[in-house]
Amino acid sequence: NDLMLVSKSWYHAACSTAKFWNRTHLNFPLSMDEQSLEDDLAKAAIRVRRASQLPLSFSLEVEVEGSLHDKIADFIKPLTQRISHFSLVVPGDFEAVFDLHLLDELFPYQGSASGEHVKWDALESLKLDVLTRSRPDFLDVIFCTTVNRFPRLQHLTLDTPLHAIMSPSPTFENLTSLTIDDMASYSTSVCLSILEQCSNLQRCRLRPTRSSSDAEGEPPTIPNVRLPYLTDLTISNSTGCERTACRILRQLETPSLRSFVYAIEDLEMSTSD
């Protein structure tokens, strides 16, 4: 924006340089009213036009009430086949975002009566940072679909209360990078149920935050998970969660591993070639 203030020629040069406009961050705080939201979406639409035909990157922080989610979804959905990087952050755990209507709109259940199918054919990187509560089939609705809605997705970051995957996911088979930033809601078996579907994974970062006492109810025996192409593994956990981290490590088979980092708060140990 500063470049556009130098002169008219610089203004026109900046407006015509598509690479200046294909990355957009939108923040919708809880206090935002409908008119302000519409104004921000109108500005984002200008950025999209100036980005020409370049792939788009969107980062959204959404705290507004569910009644405004439709407006956000109506803006994003026509663009999904151009979006290569998408990040959705829903901070907090309050009633205003309890139903996560925006997720239902952007990633509709393919068996729904509406039959709507939102295509994300260009998406390569996805981050879901949803700290609110979610229904048990959350992962299945988004990822375990008959038709792979993310055919090019390679990088996935999850920081959200999720549950075990109940169905095969064509999306996870294509991942080369997976980050589970906060495993406070993950049991060891749930974590491994995700990893076992990531057969082409090359890089993985896990952050268990469960204390060992929270792991009660885990199956007594859990099958090993083989990740034949994994080369980089990072596990970081808070003090008291070492048992969970060790249990995950015991179940992993990583014949191609070249770099391993294990961190406990400020203490870090690493091994690499």
Image: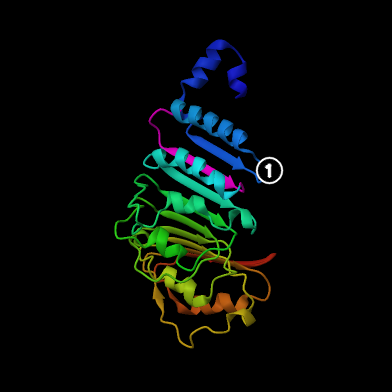
Q: Which residue is mark 1?
A: 31
Residue 198 lies in the magenta stretch: no
Q: Quadrant of residue 132?
A: bottom right
Considering the numbered disc 1 on the image, is that residue within a helix, a strand or a loop? Answer: loop
Let me know if residue 211 appears in the view: yes
Q: Nearer the viewer, residue 9 or 271?
A: 9
Residue 62 painted magenta: yes
Which residue is painted at 37% across and 47% down in the image?
118
- The residue under the point 40% across, 67% down is 256
Up the image or down, 83 lies above or below 255; here it is above
Residue 83 in picture, x, y percent from top left: 42, 41
Residue interval drawn in magenta: 51-64
Q: Is residue 80 left or right of residue 46?
A: left
Q: What amino acid is at disc 1? A: Ser
- Residue 268: image location, x then y, percent: 64, 66
**Residue 272 visible in rendering:** no
